[in-house]
Amino acid sequence: MSRFAYYPGCSATGTSIEYDASTRAICEQLGIGLQEIPGWSCCGSTPAHAVDPVLSAALSARNIMQAGTMGLDTITTPCPSCLKNLRSTRQKLQDDAFRAKVERLVDGAIPTDIPIVSVLQIIFEHIGAQGLKDRTTKPLTGLKLAPYYGCMLSRPKELMNFGDPENPMSLDILMPALGAEIVPFPLKTECCGASLGVTRRGVVTRLSGRILDVAESMGADAIVTACPLCQMNLDMRQGQINRDNNTRHNMPVFYYSQLIGLALGLDDAALGLDKLYVPPFKLLDRIGPKAADAKATA
């Protein structure tokens, strides 16, 4: 079993607890060992860098330093925002003068050469579509998905280095291996409004509403994503979106890890499906091998 230093991120203990639970569950099933970084803390999320660049870097650098004590050669996280912060900090630490300032704040030496990758990238590159297909026991036949990557998972290209920044394909490739169908989705990297849901809700309901509109128009049953903030805006705020935009969306928004877990035969509770604001169970009742049988006899 390959082992990785695992950084859950703050949302894993609250708003995206189901993402963390399903990530841990599928990684165990796939032979990907996740060893939680001891004493991990917030990476600074989206606002810290605007306050103080050195302090912001110290927040992420402390987690890198903690990971360096574990004897593992790679850090992984499920959250694109955390990934961007950890990677950008590692890049900034290449400057000796900047690193010295940060190391004074964290009171220790920070390794600058530890690879940092997303859990999705590990699954895509180490397990792959065929590996998932071989392990699938409950195919997601009949489920039409709009793959939504968000604006950070593959951007900026030079920093994230995972897929085409305008047309990433990892979800497009992995989900069909589980038996699902991918619909053409032109907004796969458009912004959902991110954290503006706190300060300017109308921006989020407009941008996220557009994503839901297009997903529905393309014939999708659900959206699949890898970002906690994107999932929250599209799922938890769907009622607000409907009120603000006079729409009637009722579209489940899954984490990719939940769908992999379903296809691997893991229990619904272990995947946190009951945590989704838009209940997915009526939709899930309609998919599977029975969907293929019904289509064949139609």
Image: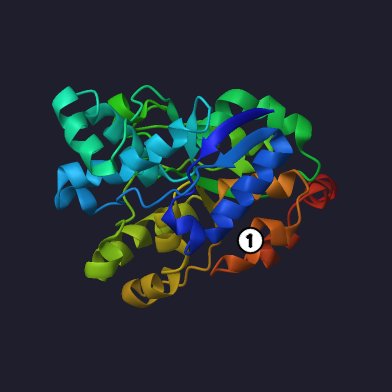
- In the rendered view, tell whether residue 242 sits above or below residue 27: below
- In the rendered view, tell whether residue 97 sits above or below residue 22: above
Is residue 187 visible to us here? no
Name the secondary structure under disc 1. loop
Q: x, y percentage for residue 168?
A: 43, 32
Left or right placement of residue 9 versus residue 144 in this view: left
Q: x, y percentage for residue 215?
A: 46, 53
Identify which residue is drawn at 53% across, 27% down: 71
Identify which residue is drawn at 32% across, 30% down: 109
Is residue 192 visible to us here? yes
Q: Based on the displayed image, in which of its 4 quarters is residue 96 positioned?
A: top left
Kindly identify the amino acid type of the residue bearing the numbered disc 1. Answer: Gly
- In the rendered view, tell whether residue 231 sits above or below residue 157: below
Q: Residue furthest front?
A: 107
The residue closer to the viewer here, 256 or 216, is 256
Q: x, y percentage for residue 263?
A: 73, 45
Q: From the image, tell me which residue sits under label 1.
A: 272
Left or right placement of residue 17 versus residue 231 in this view: right
